[in-house]
Image: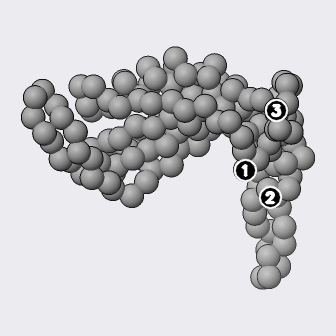
């Protein structure tokens, strides 16, 4: 989200995020429409990590490398599963990653490179509908190279 300069109540300049400026500046990608929402290639990817530190490290790496526009690190959850013939129970940190189909191969590689599990859960879901401006923002953020700013 872009920040804009304003004058604070103390009379000093400050920066605040402006969602309106974001909506005006982020063009929606071209594409067909279904139910009035541009068809984008936005995906939501789910993975789980063993602790908050590894989840935060993964989130920062994915956003920094621009393979993800946004990563939500959620509250701990308890997972029940079978592994190597035994029933297991583990406290894990769910992570939801917003990206695009085009960046998925790089995203998967980055998750595997930063993930401590031998066989990490990596499941991608297509985003069927959403606020067009937000979906456009995700697509724009994932277009850039690491360290670049694709917005004008």
Q: Which quadrant, please, contains the C terminus?
A: top right
Residue 111 lies left or right of residue 69; in this view the side is: left
Location of residue 105 in the rendering, given as x and y in whole percent from the top left corner? 52, 17
Q: CA separation, marks 3 and 1? A: 27 Å
Query: Along the polypeptide, which appears first: circle 3 or circle 1?
Result: 1
Q: Is residue 15 above or below residue 129?
A: below
Residue 148 lies left or right of residue 106; in this view the side is: right
Q: Quadrant of residue 39?
A: top right
Single out the mark in the foreground, 3 or 1. 3
Query: Along the polypeptide, which appears first: circle 3 or circle 2?
Result: 2
Location of residue 120 in the rendering, given as x and y in whole percent from the top left corner? 32, 29
Q: Is residue 149 visible?
A: no
Q: Is residue 140 above or below residue 22?
A: above
Q: Disc 2 on helix, strand or loop? A: loop
Residue for badge 1: 1
Residue 145 lies left or right of residue 79; in this view the side is: right
Residue for badge 3: 34
Residue for badge 2: 18
Q: Nearer the viewer, residue 99 or 148?
A: 99
Q: Is residue 119 above or below residue 54?
A: above
């Amino acid at each position: 989200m872009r920040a804009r300069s304003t004058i604070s109540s103390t009379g000093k300049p400050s920066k605040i995020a402006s969602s309106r400026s974001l909506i005006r500046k982020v063009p929606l990608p071209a594409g067909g429409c279904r139910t009035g929402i541009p068809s984008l290639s936005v995906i939501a990817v789910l993975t789980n990590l063993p602790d908050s530190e590894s989840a935060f490290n993964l989130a920062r790496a994915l956003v920094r490398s621009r393979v993800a526009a946004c990563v939500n690190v959620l509250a701990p959850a308890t997972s029940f599963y079978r592994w190597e013939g035994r029933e297991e129970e583990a406290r894990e940190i769910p992570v939801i990653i917003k990206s695009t189909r085009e960046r998925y191969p790089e995203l998967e590689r980055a998750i595997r490179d930063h993930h401590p599990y031998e066989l990490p859960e990596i499941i991608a879901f297509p985003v069927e509908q959403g606020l067009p401006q937000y979906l456009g923002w995700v697509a724009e953020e994932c277009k850039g190279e690491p360290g670049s700013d694709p917005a004008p």
